[in-house]
Image (tube, grey):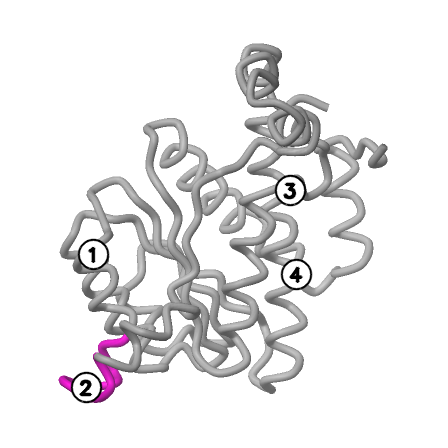
Amino acid sequence: MKEYISKEELYKRFSEKNPHLVDMIPQIEMAVVAICECYARGGRVFCCGNGGSSSDSAHIVGEFLKGFLRERPLSEEDKMALSTYGDLGVLLANKLQGALAAIDLTTQQAIMSAVANDTDPTLMYAQQLWGLGREGDVLIGISTSGNAKNVVAAGIAALHKGMKTIALTGEGGGRMGELFDIVLAAPNSWTPEVQECHIAIYHLICALVEDAFFEA
């Protein structure tokens, strides 16, 4: 069983480990509200990042799609329905976890290579959002400088689609800081330190969103 951590304890641990990020908590809470509102309406969260930040994109999606700090067991109704499918159904009933719909745009190799070859690699994420994004969905874009053109282009496409946009950037926010709805600009400019801040920030976001939708 996973250790239960209350919302108050999440904030306490975050603040103690990251005193330089405490001033960002109001912006972090804005991001949490935006994501929770999206999920409450049946929407989806899309993530993308440039370079090393593409790994952070995949990391965030992984935390949403299965249990992060909580077990997220299925409802008894779902368990009973799945169990009618024999041994494999029982496995599904006992092991599947509650999920929050999230899509990592950085792993779609076929469409990304097609866009890079046929149009422009800058549009590798924007093209996906043009086809998949819907009003009320959320885009989390990650760039340590805030200027990665592929992520900025995704933000423009998302805004046109009526999506809410959340930027994880470094100090100053860059171009993303000008365009995105909610800007989480780490108070650092050196890439390794910005990325370390991002991990702490999005772990808190994922934990708070999970707390809102799944019981302990």
Circles 3 and 4: CB atoms closer than 8 Å: no
Residue at 68%, 31% (x, y): give it: 91
Q: Point out residue 163 in the picture as x, y percentages from the top left corner.
A: 25, 49
Q: Circle 4 sits on which residue?
A: 21
Q: Seen in the image, is 116 located left or right of residue 145?
A: left
Q: Circle 3 sits on which residue?
A: 207
Q: Amino acid at mark 4?
A: Leu
Q: Amino acid at mark 2?
A: Asp
Secondary structure state at the residue bearing disc 1: helix
Of the pair 68 and 110, the residue shown nearer to us: 110
Q: Which mark is residue 137?
A: none
Q: Amino acid at mark 3?
A: Ala
Q: Is residue 136 above or below residue 194?
A: above
Q: Circle 2 sits on which residue?
A: 120
Q: Amino acid at mark 1?
A: Leu
Residue at 51%, 76% (x, y): give it: 171
Q: Magenta segment range?
A: 115-124
Secondary structure state at the residue bearing disc 3: helix
Instruction: Give the mark toward the camera: 1 or 2.
Output: 2
